Image (cartoon, rainbow, N blue to C red):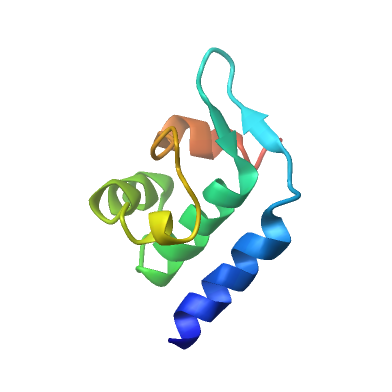
C-alpha cells in the first residue's frame, strides 16, 4: 500500500533525529512526535488535545512505523515543543 511505503520512508529518514525530553517526563523521540502531528492533522484534529486523543485512540496505526515505547505525549508537552 502506498501509505505504508510513505510512512516507512518517513521512519527511515527520521531515524537520525535526536530524542527530546520534557522536564521530569519520559523522553519522546522526535520522529514519533512528528508522525503523531502528521497523523493527527490528516485525521482532522484541530488542536493539540485532539491530536493526543487521536493518538491514544489510534496508537496501533503509528506503532506500525515507529515504536512509541513511552506512549503518546500529553497535550501540555506537545504545546511546549514548537516553542523550542
Point out the image quarter for the C terminus: top right
Which is nearer the eye, 73 or 1?
A: 1
In terms of image quadrants, where is residue 80? top right
Residue drawn at (63%, 44%), measured in percent from left and top? 30
Q: Residue at x 51, y 63 (%)?
A: 38
Residue closest to the far top: 24
Give the percent coordinates (x, y) of residue 16: 76, 50
Residue 72 sits in which quadrant? top left
Q: Residue at x 45, y 43 (%)?
A: 68
Q: How many marks?
A: 0
Assign the N terminus to one quadrant of the image: bottom left
Q: Is residue 47 left or right of residue 58?
A: right
Is 62 situated above or below 68? below
Where does residue 21 sit, x and y in percent of width and height?
62, 26
Location of residue 54 (image quadrant)? bottom left
What residue is drawn where x is 28% and y is 56%? 58
Residue 30 at least partly seen: yes
Vertical comparison of 19 with 31: above or below: above
Indicate whether 78 appears above or below 3. Answer: above
Q: Residue furthest left?
A: 57
Tell me, yes or no, if residue 46 can be seen here.
Answer: no
Q: Position of residue 55 (x, y in %)?
A: 34, 50
Amino acid at each position: 500500500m502506498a501509505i505504508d511505503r510513505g510512512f516507512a520512508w518517513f521512519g527511515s529518514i527520521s531515524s537520525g533525529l535526536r530524542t527530546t525530553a520534557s522536564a521530569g517526563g519520559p523522553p519522546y523521540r522526535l520522529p514519533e512526535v512528528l508522525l503523531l502531528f502528521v497523523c493527527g492533522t490528516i485525521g482532522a484534529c484541530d488542536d493539540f488535545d485532539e491530536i493526543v486523543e487521536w493518538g491514544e485512540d489510534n496508537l496501533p496505526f503509528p506503532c506500525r512505523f515507529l515504536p512509541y515505547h513511552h506512549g503518546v505525549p500529553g497535550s501540555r508537552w506537545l504545546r511546549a515543543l514548537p516553542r523550542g
